[in-house]
Amino acid sequence: MTKKIKSCCLIILISITIYGQRSSTGLIPLNDLGSGLYKNFQGGLYLNGSNLRPAKHDFLGIELSKQIKPIDKNGNVDTLLGKYVLLSIGMSNTTQEFSYFKTIADTYKTKNPNLIIVDGAQGGQTAAIISNPNANFWTVIEQRLAQAGTTSKQVTVCWLKEADANPTQAFPVHANILTNELIAIVNNIKIKFPNCLLVYCSSRTYGGYATTSLNPEPFAYESGFSVKWLIEKQITGDTELVFTGNNPKAPWLSWGPYLWADGIIPRSDGLVWLQTDFRSDDGTHPSTNGQKKVAELLLNFFKTDVTAKNWFLKNPITSYQQTEINTVPDNYQLYQNYPNPFNPSTTIVYQLPSSSWVTLKVFDMLGREVTTLVNEYKQAGRYNCEWRIDNGELSSGVYFYTIKAGNFFKSEKMILIK
């Protein structure tokens, strides 16, 4: 082996092992694993290795989101003075991340003024503890709601991010335990907060820098399967997770932002976790950098997800109207928008030769997602989608719109002039 190769190997070894910690594990994030397997269990965030919510579940979530309206402290609709609450549920990492999110979201000028954000997460309150409906955790939440001038009946949406401390069991035992605890937790949420309609779930961030046994790798990674299995159980009809009908036992469940990435190895969407994203004393709790990273992922999710943006934003950054042209084309196509350049609106036309799940997104010049215009299952046909800039937040310049339908992928650029 040459000296040059030995030097390269040494550099790689140093980058992977820092003070006995790992900046990479070689594990594949669930959203990149797809239909691949981890210890005989399929990846992907949802069923069949997919990262997209199943069409029916997505539709039901959208319909429930439309029911979120300002309500008074007794749970009655009050569009004049009422409010609704987004509440966090979890332990120490959750409260640190959500507190940062609350700080930036409360100053976000297009946040719906009827939305009150309350941090209910608490240090040391593991999934095993709060799965008990009589845990003091729930009493503290009632106190925090009261301090915010709200009540349990005004809680309509939750962000749930939980884990267990010091797991030791081999996979999938500990992950199944956590899934069962999560089931109990969402049951508790529905009992404690009867008007809660939506719960968005996230799993742990990267645990490779951990210097304690609190929640290192691979347990942090494997907790993603716990969330995946929880949501899959609801989608496939688990009776303990029914969210429709006269006697729902849980809110509607979905992934929020999936937070795990393999340390310094970029995920397909570019997410990485650096050692500086975590506190130096334990390598597990987020530093200010880590809190900011999760907070921004949360904010982007609530601004853009089809089940969230209409209740989260006062006036969504973009609005669109979509009409179907009654012809069945013979190929996939994404056409140039018109007019182009445009202000304040433009029309995007696309066509599908067969029924497909369609995502149509807009990005800025730096590749940052501006909005999701379409994220749903569409029948074969030709569609017009109008994109209207409502609130002046976007600056003049070049933007890109991208469609993905089946195996079809195409991008075009357009110009906004003010």
Image (tube, rainbow, N blue to C red):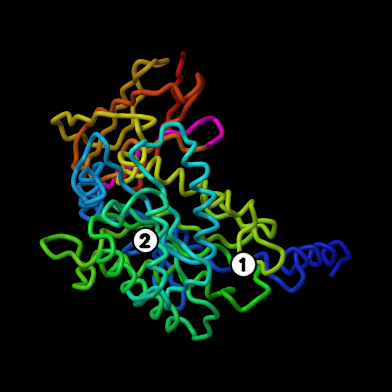
Q: Which mark is residue 86?
A: none
| Cα gap from disc 1 to disc 2, whole angstroms | 28 Å
Quarter that holds the N terminus = bottom right
- Vertical placement of 268 versus 300: above or below? below
Q: Nearer the viewer, residue 296 or 274?
A: 296
- Going by the picture, which residue comes out furthest to the bottom? 169
Q: Nearer the viewer, residue 377 or 211?
A: 211
Residue at 38% over, 55% down: 145
Residue 228 coordinates in the image, percent (x, y): 37, 66
Residue 313 coordinates in the image, percent (x, y): 36, 36
Q: Nearer the viewer, residue 272 or 312?
A: 312
- Vertical placement of 158 versus 26: above or below? above
> Which of the 4 image quarters holds residue 239?
bottom left
For label 2, the SS is: helix
* Eye-nearest disc, 1 or 2: 2
Which residue in the structure is indicated by mark 2?
142
Residue 61 coordinates in the image, percent (x, y): 25, 51
Q: Is residue 365 part of the magenta span, yes or no?
A: yes
Q: Which mark is residue 284?
A: 1
> Which of the 4 image quarters holds residue 341?
top left
For label 1, the SS is: loop
Q: Which residues are magenta?
A: 356-367
Q: Is residue 246 left or right of residue 193?
A: left
Q: Is residue 285 left or right of residue 306?
A: right
Residue at 82% over, 64% down: 5
Q: Nearer the viewer, residue 171 or 310?
A: 310
The tally of labels here is 2
